[in-house]
């Protein structure tokens, strides 16, 4: 039978849109270019999946930029953060909330999160077409009429989905089941008709997961404005000469304050940081990366780390003075080891212009001042690049003033709905982006199902 609603993209927004529409009685076909659902969910949070951010919804919304918060507010109140958590806990997922508000599975992983979402789709009767990349929209007279996509090819990668009750569709199977709504356009392309199409193809980060910016191409073709795309939650590559010190790679700093400066401070984030072979990553880096990427065209951006964020300058300096006085025969390096892993001690001392064989008794006033300054603002390098394709999400996308925030309807083409990361919305690290994706997808699916009813 012909679908009432076609959903393009089986990420967080697409899964929620398809499930909600089907629950309201719509016949839904979910079209996915890869061989599984929720690929980016599977890699989120290092495979742990930060499913939501806890706390009052207004506080959650404040984490977004004001225009983005205004846009997603109606959707987030239709599917609140506590309701999202309940969707998973009601199916046996045990969760815990970190002190910073991030909600994670307690003794399970992102695979369990995706398995629950798969159950919801199965129960709702959503038809899923895997390995079926959409090549374009069919729009006639200002009304969407369907999609074109390359037909599925069976491959070994389907074993996982087959075990869950899914199977790839060949063009022959599709024509048999969908009848006149599906037409073979060419040897490998199929045209699928429906007058309600939900686009939730994501952005262009993690392109191997299938998010390659396709939705933006189609949006431009039908008259939508696409705001310039930039990295948002991404690692940062540093420009260190001659090369980033090999001893840093793989080392983590815990509970530090990372600052980005362009003359003056432009961004900061508290949490953990991980040194990589090309620069830095981790929650603090993801937290500042969007502003860093935006400001780089204006000039150099440098990163520095406050290794003792809970102490002010005077408190830290007093601690150093006491250490030198009480331990005159100990190396100053042993004090620095209280703030950084051993492999970073020499680097911190070098920045403070202190020899690694300096004893407490030899630490003069100027050296104490330099060490205090370094521990409070250790320079780790100038930014070379913020790789958009390595980010968890991107900023930019379809302009928000061209989408109705109450319904997720396109204001350019009838029957088209837009949700998730394809929109110009990007929250900080911490479960905010899944909140936005789930909520906008929920509203898009709901509206499409209601609009499809006679």
Image: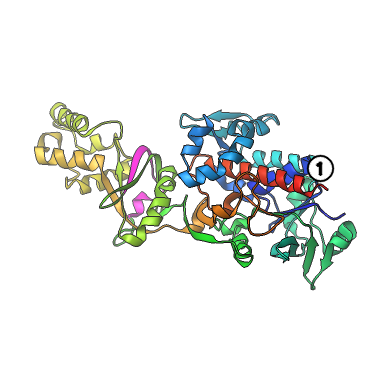
**Residue 325 at what x, y percent from top left?**
13, 28
Give the total number of marks visible in the rendering: 1
> Which residue is drawn at the image coordinates 73% and 61% (left, top)?
143
State the quadrant of the N terminus: bottom right
**Residue 285 at what x, y percent from top left?**
41, 47
**Residue 148 at what x, y percent from top left?**
74, 65
Please indicate, yes or no, whether residue 49 appears anywhere in the rendered image.
no
- Residue 349 position by quadrant: top left
Asked if 84 appears above or below 147 in the picture, the reply is above
Q: Nearer the viewer, residue 295 or 37?
A: 295
Asked if 225 appears above or below 309 in the picture, the reply is below
Residue 399 sits inside the magenta stretch: no
Q: Nearer the viewer, residue 95 or 7?
A: 7
Q: Is residue 327 left or right of residue 46?
A: left
Q: Nearer the viewer, residue 252 or 75?
A: 75
**Residue 279 at what x, y percent from top left?**
38, 54
Instruction: Specify start and end residues of the magenta stretch as a single range.
Output: 245-260
Please indicate, yes or no, whether residue 183 appears anywhere in the rendered image.
yes
Q: Is residue 363 left or right of residue 427?
A: left
- Residue 140 position by quadrant: bottom right
Q: Is residue 336 left or right of residue 136?
A: left
Q: Which residue is mark 1?
A: 25
């Amino acid at each position: 039978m012909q679908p009432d609603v076609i959903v393009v993209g089986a990420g967080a927004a697409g899964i929620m849109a398809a499930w909600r529409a089907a629950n309201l009685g719509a016949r839904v076909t979910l079209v996915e270019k890869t061989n599984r659902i929720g690929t980016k969910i599977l890699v989120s949070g290092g495979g742990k999946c930060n499913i939501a951010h806890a706390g009052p919804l207004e506080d959650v919304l404040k984490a977004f930029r004001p225009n983005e918060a205004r846009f997603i507010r109606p959707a987030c109140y239709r599917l609140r953060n506590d309701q999202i958590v309940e969707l998973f806990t009601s199916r046996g997922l045990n969760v815990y909330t970190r002190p910073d508000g991030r909600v994670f599975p307690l003794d399970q992983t992102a695979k369990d999160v995706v398995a629950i979402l798969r159950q919801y789709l199965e129960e709702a009767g959503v038809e899923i077409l895997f390995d079926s990349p959409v090549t374009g929209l069919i729009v006639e007279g200002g009304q969407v009429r369907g999609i074109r996509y390359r037909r599925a090819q069976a491959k070994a990668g389907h074993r996982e989905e087959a075990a869950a009750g899914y199977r790839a569709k060949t063009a022959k199977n599709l024509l048999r089941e969908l009848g006149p709504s599906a037409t073979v356009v060419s040897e490998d392309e199929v045209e699928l008709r429906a007058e309600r199409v939900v686009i939730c193809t994501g952005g262009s980060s993690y392109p191997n997961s299938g998010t390659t910016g396709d939705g933006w191409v189609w949006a431009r073709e039908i008259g939508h404005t696409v705001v310039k795309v930039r990295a948002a939650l991404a690692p940062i590559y540093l420009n260190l000469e001659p090369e980033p010190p090999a001893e840093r790679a793989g080392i983590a700093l815990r509970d530090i304050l990372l600052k980005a400066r362009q003359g003056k401070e432009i961004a900061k984030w508290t949490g953990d940081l991980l040194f990589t072979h090309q620069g830095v990553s981790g929650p603090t880096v993801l937290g500042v990366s969007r502003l860093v990427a935006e400001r780089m065209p204006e000039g150099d951006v440098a990163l520095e780390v406050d290794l003792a964020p809970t102490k002010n300058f005077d408190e830290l300096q007093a601690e150093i003075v006491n250490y030198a006085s009480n331990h005159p025969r100990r190396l100053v390096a042993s004090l620095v080891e209280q703030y950084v892993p051993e492999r970073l001690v020499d680097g911190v001392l070098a920045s403070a212009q202190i020899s690694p064989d300096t004893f407490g008794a030899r630490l003069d006033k100027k050296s104490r001042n330099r060490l205090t300054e370094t521990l409070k603002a250790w320079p780790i390098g100038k930014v070379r690049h913020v790789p958009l394709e390595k980010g968890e999400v991107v900023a930019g996308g379809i302009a928000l003033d061209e989408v109705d925030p109450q319904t997720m309807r396109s204001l350019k083409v009838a029957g088209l709905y837009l949700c998730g990361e394809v929109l110009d919305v990007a929250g900080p690290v911490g479960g905010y982006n899944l909140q936005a994706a789930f909520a906008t997808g929920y509203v898009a699916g709901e509206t499409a199902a209601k609009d499809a009813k006679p």
